[in-house]
Amino acid sequence: MDVPYIPEEWNVLRDRAFAKNPNLNGTSVFGKYLSKMKLKQWKQYT
């Protein structure tokens, strides 16, 4: 799996998920992050 790690994007998704549900787990954020990183705008990163 070749997915870039961009801390700023991860933090935005984590903060949004936490605002909706303070009892969140990392798996829900990870799934959203993966789907976001598959978008064209992130294709140049590895």
Image (cartoon, rainbow, N blue to C red):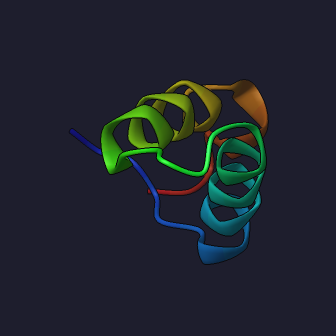
How far across and how far down the image is residue 40, in percent?
72, 27
Q: For this rendering, which residue is in front, 23 or 4?
A: 23
Image check: 43 left or right of 19?
left
Q: For this rendering, which residue is in front, 38 or 23?
A: 23
Q: For this rendering, which residue is in front, 42 or 27?
A: 27
Q: Is residue 29 above or below residue 46?
A: above
Q: In this view, does 26 lie above or below 20?
A: below
Q: Quadrant of the N terminus?
A: top left
Q: For this rendering, which residue is in front, 42 or 25?
A: 25
Q: Give the number of marks.
A: 0
Q: Is residue 42 above or below residue 12?
A: above
Find the residue positioned furthest to the bottom: 7
Image check: 34 left or right of 1?
right
Find the residue positioned furthest to the left: 1
How far across and how far down the image is residue 9, in percent?
71, 60
Quadrant in the picture for residue 46: bottom left
Which residue is at a point 63% across and 40% down the rendered structure image?
A: 21
How far across and how far down the image is residue 28, in percent?
43, 33
Which residue is at a point 35% across and 50% down the rendered structure image?
A: 26
Quadrant in the picture for residue 32: top right
How far across and how far down the image is residue 18, in percent?
66, 52
